Amino acid sequence: MKTFSFPAKWALFALTLLFFASCHNNRQEQAVQKDLVASFPTGNRFQPDAPLTLTFKKVPELLKGLSQEARNQVVTLKPEVKGKLFQVSQKTLVFQPEKPLAFGQKYEVTVHLDKLFNHPASNTFRFSLQTAPLEVALNIRNMEPYLFGKKPLARLTGTVQASGNTDVAAVKKALSAKQGDKPLPVKVSAEDNRTFRFTVDSIERTDEPQQVVVTLDGKALGAQNSVVKTYTIPSLKKFTFLQYNVVTTPQLHLELVFSNRVSPDQNLKGLVYFSDGTPVSLSVKN
């Protein structure tokens, strides 16, 4: 078998050529930015649902002669992103992607200046941007005891919050709950594109404390983190105060949550009061 050696001087020569080519490209980008480009997206937390806004130092004189299809090719991204280019002012262009960019993704952006200007210093202007990663949070807000016939059950309510726009169908797939090895039904509804309410239902209650594990699979949503929360369902034998919630509608009031149902006939006088003597109106909601 023949072997071929590559002289060290040629390797050094090749590296030198690459270095000077890189320096030349950098000087070109700097010259273009100085002469033509006033502003462009930068940073590593670009919002995936935001458009790319480019402002130039002079009016792109060739833009008027371009069809919409040709305009859409003025700005290209790697990985490839389809979208439309709009002129929002004489010197400002906006590239609107058809779909939100991926979370936590680096994009190489090329602006084809030769389609906008006559005889630019460089045919292209290149820059990169990094979209913000998706982060998710899971909060268990409340436990509500109830009876199904004569069977004591409980449900948990809570919220899922995302740092970016997220589809409710994806959240439904990513959220699960178990009591021991038994999967529990979970209902999810969207408050908006970033906040979701959920209910874990049909939790069995016994004379022993029970553990319910709620899991949010962040990777299924494209997030970097996943969240697992464990909630202890109190024993039926133990009546305990769980938490309070501040409710603002239809009128401001405090909601006190206990581990077991309170009888509607329970005399509540003197059981709940303000230390300064402020009058309290109490009612039972089961």
Image (cartoon, rainbow, N blue to C red):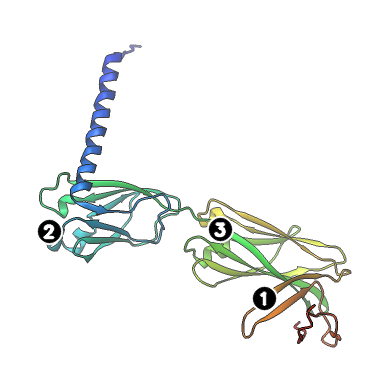
Quadrant in the picture for residue 250 = bottom right
Q: Position of residue 56 (x, y in %)?
A: 21, 56
Callout 1 crowding tier (Cα within 10 Å): few <14, some 14–19, many ≥20: few
Report how many numbered discs are placed on residues in the image.
3
Q: CB atoms at circles 1 and 3 under 8 Å apart?
A: no
User: Residue 246, which numbered label?
Assistant: 1
Q: Position of residue 196 (x, y in %)?
A: 56, 68
Quadrant in the picture for residue 286 = bottom right
Q: Of all residues shown, which one is farthest toward the top?
A: 2
Task: Give above or below for 119 relative to 181.
Answer: above
Task: Give above or below for 262 relative to 110.
Answer: below
Residue assigned mark 3:
136
Q: Earlier in the sequence, mark 1 or mark 3?
A: 3
Instruction: Identify the residue shown where x is 23% and y is 61%.
Output: 92
Q: Nearer the viewer, residue 137 or 180?
A: 137
**Residue type for callout 2:** Glu
Q: Earlier in the sequence, mark 2 or mark 1?
A: 2
Callout 2 crowding tier (Cα within 10 Å): few <14, some 14–19, many ≥20: few
Residue assigned mark 2:
61
